[in-house]
Amino acid sequence: MAAPVSRLTLSESLALGPEWRHACHAMLYAPEPGKLFGRIPLRYAVLMQMRFDGRLGFPGGFVDVHKGSLEDGLNRELAEELGDAASGFRVERSDYRSSHAAASAPRVVAHFYAKLLAREQLLAVERAAPHARDHGLEVLGLVRVPLYTLRDGVGGLPAFLDNVFIGTARDQLLEALQDLKIVDSNYISGIKLPARR
Ligand SMILES: O=c1[nH]cnc2c1ncn2[C@H]1C[C@H](O)[C@@H](COP(=O)(O)OP(=O)(O)O)O1
Ligand SMILES: [Mn+2]
Ligand SMILES: [Mn+2]
Ligand SMILES: [Mn+2]
């Protein structure tokens, strides 16, 4: 059973004691004009990654709040996990979206960001990723998130959501897709969400 997680404001999370570790992850996305099978608009390319532990998550990782800002740590992690193309942009505090603290050990507070890239920047990330330091180790590969539901009512995002996600990554994804209008507002609520695992 997943441990209870509470949402904190950024200042609340930065006030947590030294027993807490901070992690920052980012959803990178860009407009995608393509159509699947020539008829299903893709609208956006949204990146996640298959992790070493077989779970889906966002690029990012642990940051040391004593060695710089949260974003300094996040952009360092992005360079390690995505490679050179991550230097083509910088995730900033203005891209910050939420912080969630897991009540049980290990005490990790997960900060989440979403960064809109130009399509060329995202394609450069996808091209560079296999040459990243962590590729084949912590990161087993980037994936795009399907943002549609196929005629069978399951294929696409519903099937994607049936994967195992790390921490709060699935909720972070769904909230961002909705809030950033990457998908239509009633689309997410219309999906029969598989039970969390
Ligand atoms: O995508 C994520 N969303 C929310 N929390 C996450 C995500 N990925 C990992 N986590 C949690 C659980 C992990 O133990 C910590 C640290 O992240 P991780 O990426 O595994 O750390 P490193 O890259 O090894 O520094 O955050
Ligand atoms: Mn790390
Ligand atoms: Mn890492
Ligand atoms: Mn990581």
Image (cartoon, helix red, strand yellow):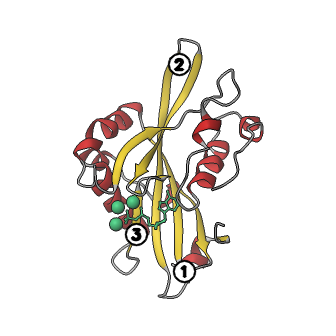
Report the disc number at residue 36.
Answer: 2
**What residue do we see at 67% from left, 43% from top?**
178
Give left or right: position of 154 versus 109. Answer: right
Contact between labelled residues 2 and 3, with CB atoms less than 8 Å apart:
no
Q: Earlier in the sequence, mark 1 or mark 3?
A: 3
Residue type at tag 2: Leu
Instruction: Let me know if residue 150 appears in the view.
Output: yes
Q: Which residue is mark 1?
A: 105
Mark pair 3, 2: CA separation: 36 Å
Give left or right: position of 163 versus 175. Answer: left
Q: Locate residue 34, reporting x and y percent.
A: 49, 20
> Does the numbered disc 3 mark a residue whose Cβ is under 8 Å from ligand 1?
yes
**What residue do we see at 40% from left, 69% from top?**
62
Contact between labelled residues 3 and 1, with CB atoms less than 8 Å apart:
no
Q: Locate residue 147, reporting x and y percent.
A: 59, 33
Q: Locate residue 160, reporting x and y percent.
A: 57, 39
Q: How many marks?
A: 3
Mark pair 1, 3: CA separation: 15 Å
Nearer the observer: mark 2 or 1; the answer is 1
Residue type at tag 1: Ala
Q: Earlier in the sequence, mark 3 or mark 2?
A: 2
The secondary structure type at the circle numbered 1 is loop
The secondary structure type at the circle numbered 3 is strand
Q: Identify the image quadrant of residue 191.
A: top right
| Quadrant location of the N terminus in the rendered image | bottom right
